[in-house]
Image (spheres, rainbow, N blue to C red):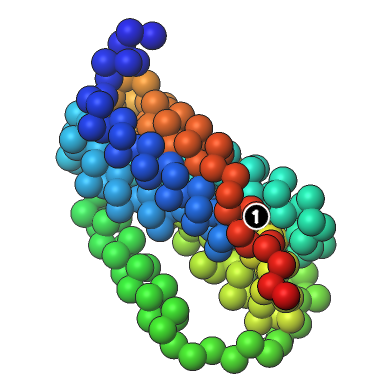
Amino acid sequence: MSSFITLFSVDSILLLLFLGAVVGIVAGLFGVGGGLVIVPVLIWSLPLLGVEESLSVHMAVGTSLATIVFTSIAAVRAHQRRGAVVWRYFLALTPGILLGAWLGGMIAGGLEGESLRRLFALFLLIVAFRMFREAPLEARYGLASRWQNSGVGLGIGAISALVGIGGGTLTVPYLNGGGVEVRRAVATSSACGLPIALAGTLSFVWVGWGAAGLPAGSSGYVYWPVVLIIVVTSTLLALPWRIVYRPTG
C-alpha cells in the first residue's frame, strides 16, 4: 500500500482526480467514455509519472480503454434506468465491435508511439471538422441489415481501440443517421462503449505484455493505478446523469 501511495506525487494525483471528474461529465453528457480527453492528457502526464516516453502513447491509449470499461458500466446503468438504450441495435453492432476492437489493439501494438500519436491527432481533426459541419438530422439510411451493422461495428471497434475512445463520436452519428433519436443514440452508444473497451483493453494487455520498461502496477499497456484514480472520481460524479435528463419545459 505504501508503494502505491508514494507512486505518484500529490500534484499528479490531483491532476488525475481532475481528469476523472472531467471524464464523468463528458461520459454523462455526450455518451462517450471520455477517451478524447483521457488520451491526450495521459500522453502528456504519463512521462511526469515516471513512464518511459517511448511507452507513453501506447499506455495512454490502453489505460484510457480500461477506464472506459468502468465509466461505460456507470453510464449504461444511468441511461437504462430511463429505458433509453435500444438493445436491438446494441446486439446488432456488438459482434463486429468486439472483433474490430481486438484487431485495433493488435494494429496499435505494431505501430511506433509517434505514429499512434499522429493517428490520434488526425482523428481529433476529423471529429472537430464534423462538429463544425452542418449535418442533416433526418434519417438517411436503415439499420436493418445484419451485414451493414456488422461491418460498421467492425470499423467502429477498430478505430475506437486504435485511438483509445469509447466510440461515441462514431456510434452516435451512425445510429442517429439511421433514424434513432439523439438521446437514445447517446444511450445506446454508451452501451456499445463497453464491448469496445473490454476487447480493446484485453488486446492492449496482450500486445504490451512483457514490453521492456513497463512501470510497476501495469499489465501490458494498461496502467492500473491511473485507471483506479480516474475511475473512482468519474464514477462518483453522478451529476451528469441528472443534467442530461433534466426536464426542459
Asked if residue 135 is positioned above or below residue 147 in the image, the reply reads below
Residue 131 position within the rendered picture, expressed as x and y whole percent measured from the top left: 44, 79
Residue 89 position within the rendered picture, expressed as x and y whole percent measured from the top left: 76, 64
Residue 104 in view (yes/no): no
Mark 1 Cα-neighbour bin, 10 Å: few <14, some 14–19, many ≥20: few
- Count of number-bearing discs: 1
Between 96 and 122, the residue placed more toward the observer is: 122
From the viewer's perspective, tell me whether residue 133 is left or right of residue 56: right
**Residue named by callout 1:** 242
Between 187 and 243, the residue placed more toward the observer is: 243
Residue 134 in view (yes/no): yes
The residue lying furthest to the top in this view is 2
Asked if residue 17 is positioned above or below residue 40 in the image, the reply reads above
Q: Quadrant of the C terminus?
A: bottom right
Residue located at (69% from left, 62% from top): 245
Between 17 and 119, the residue placed more toward the observer is: 17
Q: Quadrant of residue 10?
A: top left
Residue 107 position within the rendered picture, expressed as x and y whole percent measured from the top left: 41, 52
Asked if residue 229 is positioned above or below residue 74 in the image, the reply reads above
Q: Which secondary structure lies at badge 1? A: helix
Q: Quadrant of the N terminus?
A: top left
Between 36 and 74, the residue placed more toward the observer is: 74
Residue located at (61% from left, 59% from top): 243
Residue located at (26% from left, 47% from top): 43
Could you tell me the amino acid type at mark 1? Arg
